[in-house]
Amino acid sequence: MSERVASPGGSPGKILDDQFRAAVGALTPAPDRTDEIAPGVTGATLLELFEAQATSRHLDLAARQLGASKRGYYSIGSSGHEGNAALGLALRVNDPALLHYRSGAFFVQRARRVAGLDPIRDVLLGVVAAAADPISGGRHKVFGSKAAAVIPQTSTIASHLPRAVGLAFAIDRAARLGVSSEWPSDAVVLCSFGDASANHSTAAGAINAAIHTARQGVPLPILFLCEDNGIGISVPTPADWIQQAYGSRTGLEYFCADGCDPLDALTTSIAAAAWVREHRKPAFLHLRTVRLMGHAGSDVEAAYRRPADIAADLLRDPVTATARLLVATGTATPAEILARYDDIARRVDATAETVWQEPKLTSAAAVVAPLAATNPALVRADVLRAGPSEADHGAAEPMTLGQAINRTLADLLARDKDVLVFGEDVGRKGGVYGVTKGLQKQFGKRRVFDTLLDEQSVLGTALGTALAGFVPIPEIQYLAYVHNAADQLRGEAATLAFFSEGRYRNPMVVRIAGYAYQKGFGGHFHNDNSIAALRDIPGVVVTSPSRADDAAALLRTCVSAARVDGRVCVYLEPIALYHTRDLYEPGDNAWLATTSDIDHAEIGRARVYGDGTDITIVTFANGVPMSLRVARRLSERGIRPRVLDLRWLSPLPLQDLLHHARATGRVLIADETRHSGGVSESICAALIDAGFDGYIARVTSEDSFVPLGPAADTVLLDETKIETAAGKLLAQ
């Protein structure tokens, strides 16, 4: 027998393994064979279920052995949850699945049904962080497979539910709009999670969004699978809590099964999957399970659970339960079951002995490759593809930033059927500031639509539709509001390509109305000027236009970068500049600009105003017109300034920044965000890292929230502060 099975006595793995063997060995073979055990369940079905369950069990044991011998890494097991393999039999292989970290048996069963896949090797490659891992490439141990339609999740504390709802929403929408999608039009989305995660606000919001959407007659074929083992790490879940919380929700069909009873798990899973596929509405499958061997490899559950409770769970082992049913129905003898079990153990152990020696990722470049992949030439070509001409809008005329965004969205919607625009109030109202006015009337409610007042659901819809062939352009009304759902960008959008080595992507452009300078209106929640939480997300593009022509070019480039490279882009719109027309004097219309349908602005390239040689003022967004007015006054004093509009806040336009810094030898950074954690700190660091040996100064807003009314002027960057700082820098 293998080294793993012969491990020292008393370990949770050996206790579990020994108990299974003893229980099966004590069974008496049935005298007769029952062919059809229940509708849709035969002896062959049970054998298939057992194979997946036993494989998952041995993978758990191998992962613990690899970890104990320092050849594997942190891994959460699925032991006790093997009843979820029933869903692998109830669903089709092309039904997309977003899985809980204990859905290992489902993954094994799904992968076993796809030609060419080896779930044993695939899972163990993840455990040892091998570069050959076919889903994450050695970046994380996740359940995922492009061929098996399993979309990888990392530590799924409910954060994947909004994406799953968005994907279920997108399946029908793609079919109706003729958008090419990898999912069949009758597919069902499976989303599994634990009983502790069911209490998370993200789960509650996502399930509410699913019910709300379906209530309006919109198809939403999702099966929520709650794997309820009664404990969240060490915190118990009341036995009736999940049923009480979700068992009687109007609009949510409820199914309940004992995951430790193979027949109940199979028949209920088949019924639940069939119901969702037929009705195209959300359902909730409450699968009662147990958790065996603790939370994870390092967890000692005896420290917080009573021995009697641990022993009681061991007696409900679902793998043993399936073996009992196989014997009771005459499908297999105890000896045959143990032979299968041992054969699986040998295959798992033999694979474990080879995979731990597989090469690991050995360079930063290799690790970040999925984040760094860009094709600027293809992005430019996509921007410049033929589309509606300016003649379709009438003669080109100067416009405001808000008008330019509206026209560009219209052009993109007209040219590409994969573009969706949505968010709260973007439809009939046309947005709080009128930026999406008229788009729903022109392109219809399937392309431009309103969502719930829930930023997690807005971004979840974007994440899901992105997986179904769309390029979503969700709107978040105010910058402060995105922080309610930051993890949908940080933990979901940004990580998908990273943990799937680019096999799955999140093409999306998130429009956010932001910054301050609204003459005291609204206070903090309508004037937030903190973007640090966006700029430090690896791989996410952050851009911010200040005028109409840049607004069009930056938006077109972001949409094409999303489509071509799968980029997650955040497009920050300065609210105070939406309708600004003048620059220097009232009525000069100097901040208007014309746009065209061939505007392009390469990611990471800035825009410069002037060619002065005395000082470079580096800025962005509201800082651009302020700095231009300061530059004009400096010019009247015989000083020759230039103003550099960064446009791209992540990645910073380092090449242009350094070029224009060296051209004058003096750099003043006018940063409307905060002094600590703002953009200016990164600019200073970038210049120093590049060896810039000139003078650097910065002027920013205060480290403060933005108050209501005139008090806002006391904490925000203004022209006087910029001009004073410029004078001090020029005196050096």
Image (cartoon, helix red, strand yellow):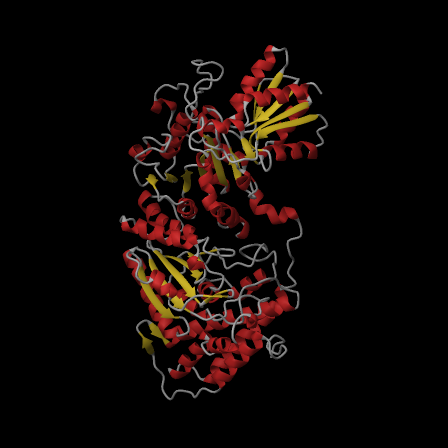
Query: Measured from the top left, where is residue 23 in percent x and y?
Result: 48, 83
Residue 506 seen in the figure: no
* Residue shown at 42% from the left, 58% from the top: 199
Residue 175 seen in the figure: yes
Which of the 4 image quadrants contains residue 63? bottom right
Q: Viewer-proximal residue, 542 or 308? A: 308
Query: Measured from the top left, where is residue 456 in percent x and y?
Result: 42, 47
Q: Viewer-proximal residue, 533 or 31? A: 533
* Residue shown at 58% from the left, 29% from the top: 700
Tally the marks. 0
In the image, residue 495 sits, relative to residue 422, either above or below, namely below
Left or right: where 574 falls relative to 723: left
Query: Measured from the top left, where is residue 463 in percent x and y?
Result: 43, 47
Which of the 4 image quadrants contains residue 575? top left
In the image, residue 652 sits, relative to residue 35, either above or below, namely above
In the image, residue 253 sits, relative to residue 344, either above or below, namely above
Q: Viewer-proximal residue, 210 or 418? A: 210
Question: If the image is split into quadrants, where does the C terminus sit?
Answer: top right
In the image, residue 333 sits, relative to residue 48, either above or below, namely below
Question: If the image is split into quadrants, where does the N terminus sit?
Answer: bottom right
* Residue shown at 49% from the left, 33% from the top: 706
Query: Measured from the top left, where is residue 709 in percent x and y?
Result: 45, 28
